[in-house]
Image (tube, helix red, strand yellow):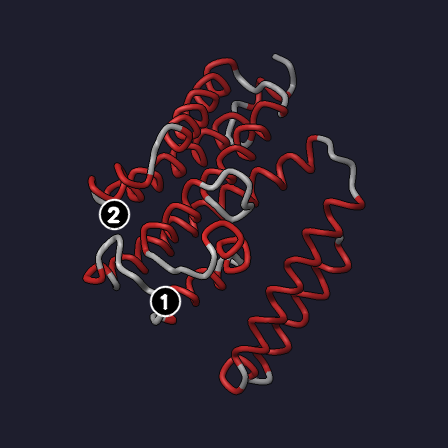
Amino acid sequence: MWEQLNRLFLAVRGAAGEDQWESDPHEFLKMVREGAHLFQGITDSTINHDQGWRFIELGRYLERAGALAVLLDVHFEMFADLGPSSELSEHLEWVGLLKSCSAFEGYCKVYTADLRADRVAEFLLLNTVFPHSIRFCMERIQSAVRSLPEGSQKATARLGRLTGRLRAALSFSNIEEIMSAGLHPWLDNVRRQLEQIHVGIREAYVDYPIERSVGA
């Protein structure tokens, strides 16, 4: 795991020194993506799935959900004039969005290659089995939080409420209601709740009184 992490770090730093980012950005990004996937696979396959692994899971899916919320918000704002139910098979921007989330093949298995904005949003927000959807990420976040040891009673109780509230919102939402109410405010609310979860994790497991760590 550490060897792969160091290898990826050195490759990225070396590519930056050789101006590969400017000369061949596609190959550079491909290298980063494949290196990150390899790190994840090695980590899941070689280390104990104990407390340390749970924190890795927690960080992975919390970061992924937040980044995806921002990406979707920006993309839909740029192409909002197309409307939520427009036929978008000719718009390569939507193919690019799905591929940037490693989601194109998964989307096609569910909806075929009929690209529509509302279906793209539904897949990346609410799909229960695709690992890059916000709902899937939230389910993994809640699972990781539940498996971690208890911190202070107040902090862990608050963290449990925060994760449960967002997971419930994702579980009981449907894309028609989200799109009709406005995707931007919905995603903005998701981002705020993810930020609160991040703060809650810090309060429960990182930024706690020294007396608690020594059993005082």
- The secondary structure type at the circle numbered 2 is helix
At which x and y percent is residue 159? 46, 24
Q: Amino acid at mark 2?
A: His
- The secondary structure type at the circle numbered 1 is loop
Which residue: 20% across, 39% down? 181
Q: Is residue 199 above or below residue 127?
A: above
Q: Is residue 110 above or below residue 205?
A: below
Which label was assigned to residue 184?
A: 2
Q: Quadrant of residue 172?
A: top left
Q: Using a 10 Å C-alpha cutoff, classify the residue at mark 2 as few (fewer than 14 neighbours), some (14 to 19) or many (20 or more).
A: some
Which residue: 38% across, 48% down? 69
> CB of mark 2 within 8 Å of CB of mark 1?
no
Q: Using a 10 Å C-alpha cutoff, classify the residue at mark 1 as few (fewer than 14 neighbours), some (14 to 19) or many (20 or more).
A: some
Which label was assigned to residue 142?
A: none
At which x and y percent is residue 177? 26, 37
With 99 as the anchor, is 215 left or right in this view? right
Which residue: 29% across, 57% down? 76
> In this view of the protein, which residue sits in the foreground, 160 or 93?
93
> In this view of the protein, which residue sits in the foreground, 208 or 63?
63
At which x and y percent is residue 173? 34, 32
What number of labels is visible? 2
Which residue: 45% across, 60% down? 98
Of labels 2 and 1, the one closer to you: 1
With 87 as the anchor, is 148 left or right in this view? right
Q: Is residue 86 above or below residue 164?
A: below
Position of the C terminus by quadrant? top right
Q: Which residue is mark 1?
A: 89
With 183 as the anchor, is 25 left or right in this view? right
Q: Earlier in the sequence, mark 2 or mark 1?
A: 1
